[in-house]
Amino acid sequence: MLLGAATSAHQIEGGTYNDWSLWEEEGKAPPVGEACNSWERMEEDIALLRRIGANAYRFSLEWSRIEVEEGLFNLKNLFRYRRFVRALLDAGITPIITLHHFTNPVWFYRSGGWLRPDAPDIFARYADLVSKYLPEVKLWITINEPNVYAYRGFVAGDWPPGERSLWKALKVLRHMMRAHSAAYEAIKGNVRGAAVGMAHHLRVFTPVGLLGRIPAALREYMFNFVPVFSEVSGEIPPPVAMMERIRAGGDFIGINYYTRDRVKFSLRQPFGVDVAPEGVWRNSLGWEVYPEGLYTLLKRYSYERPVIITENGMATERHDERVRFVLEHMRQLKRAREEGIDVRGYLYWSLMDNYEWLEGYSAKFGIFTRDRRPKGEFHLPDMWDRA
Ligand code: FCB
């Protein structure tokens, strides 16, 4: 079992400059500053991983550091990641690399980004180059949460590029699925024994009232089902595409799980509205904590494949609450495993408090604090034994 933690480049490295940086400059997101300064101190992060007894670490490569202009690659930066990968392996920690965790190079963004018809080829070229130089990495995640990316950037519009068009969101999702497929081929061709997947953000949608079943089912289909099904079956279903064939991938299913939505019918909103009842367990951002949802989603979306919980975590100031969060989710994970779901890993989000996209540093998801002082004893393997 892989046990460890997850992070992403822009959220921890410091010194990144990408489309999210533009968003920060426009005042639409808090400034990232130097984040956890991991670009300089990555090797120190390994000490943190060792302290929690982790045997796996999921982190992302910052595309904009590697492909500095279209088709122009900075190998020095890629080799910096390679040194880190080797240090992880020396420490007995399995690296799990994410190639795209929300942020894009500015040149890509300015030229149309994920709406570009050739976006899948561009992404695959990057995946191809990176995987050629990192053959010792056996676990790859092409794209993190395509559903969240498409929704926030192209429907809600509170993430770059700030569009509000369902049509564009569907196009972006289609391009991301094609990009996954092309990157899958590239990585498999370069790395012997590689397992390649995506990290899917899955949520539980609980209907409120009888009519609530309609928007809940719509959300379930669009948000959860479409991306996972496309990956596993190699066919992109409507309305994203008309069962367009892509390379079936999904050597493992990556699941990021945080919360559930309670969904009520609304005449104005086809996807319904969220209801927030009093007295339920929530994280400091107001997201409902619902451990049983992990079991539900594992049963529903594992498609008889190996599953890795690629993210699961809680924003809280209280360390005892975080421990309880992990224990309760572990219990649900164990329950799914006992019923035959092949769960191979659990990665807590996040190793340390870091930059949260719109909340900045107010959201404390970390096992450790930003200045690297441990918050207290936190030992995942022990907890796993107890769960
Ligand atoms: C996930 C993102 C991750 C982090 C957590 C809290 O959806 O993948 O970057 O922001 O939420």
Image (cartoon, rainbow, N blue to C red):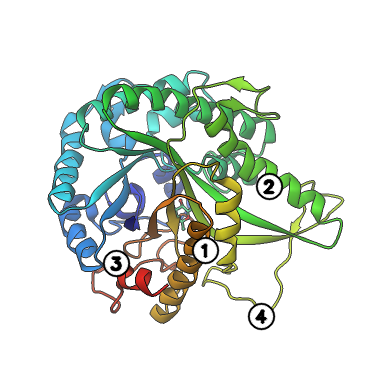
Please state which amino acid type lies under the numbered disc 1: Arg
Callout 4: SS: loop
| Mark 3–mark 1 distance (CA, rounded to whole Å) | 33 Å
| Mark 4–mark 1 distance (CA, rounded to whole Å) | 26 Å
Give the x, y percent position of residue 69: 31, 25
Give the x, y percent position of residue 228: 56, 39
Look at discs 2 and 3 and give the one toward the viewer. 2
10 Å crowding of disc 1: few (<14), some (14-19), many (20+): some
Circles 3 and 1, Cβ within 8 Å, touching? The answer is no
Please state which amino acid type lies under the numbered disc 3: Arg
10 Å crowding of disc 4: few (<14), some (14-19), many (20+): few
Q: In the drawing, what numbered circle is on residue 167?
A: none
Q: Residue sitting at 33 percent across and 35 percent down?
A: 63
Q: State which tag comes first along the sequence, 2 or 1.
A: 2
Callout 2: SS: helix
10 Å crowding of disc 2: few (<14), some (14-19), many (20+): some
Q: State which tag comes first along the sequence, 2 or 3.
A: 2
Q: State which tag comes first along the sequence, 3 or 1.
A: 1
Residue 314 in sight: no
Residue 228 in sight: yes
Kindly identify which residue carries mark 2: 220
Please state which amino acid type lies under the numbered disc 2: Glu
Quadrant of the rendering where the C terminus is positioned: bottom left
Callout 1: SS: helix
Residue 33 vs residue 90, the one in the foreground: 90
Q: In the drawing, what numbered circle is on residue 279?
A: 4
Look at discs 4 and 1 and give the one toward the viewer. 1
| Mark 2–mark 1 distance (CA, rounded to whole Å) | 23 Å
Q: State which tag comes first along the sequence, 4 or 3.
A: 4
**Above or below 245: residue 33:** below
Look at discs 2 and 1 and give the one toward the viewer. 1
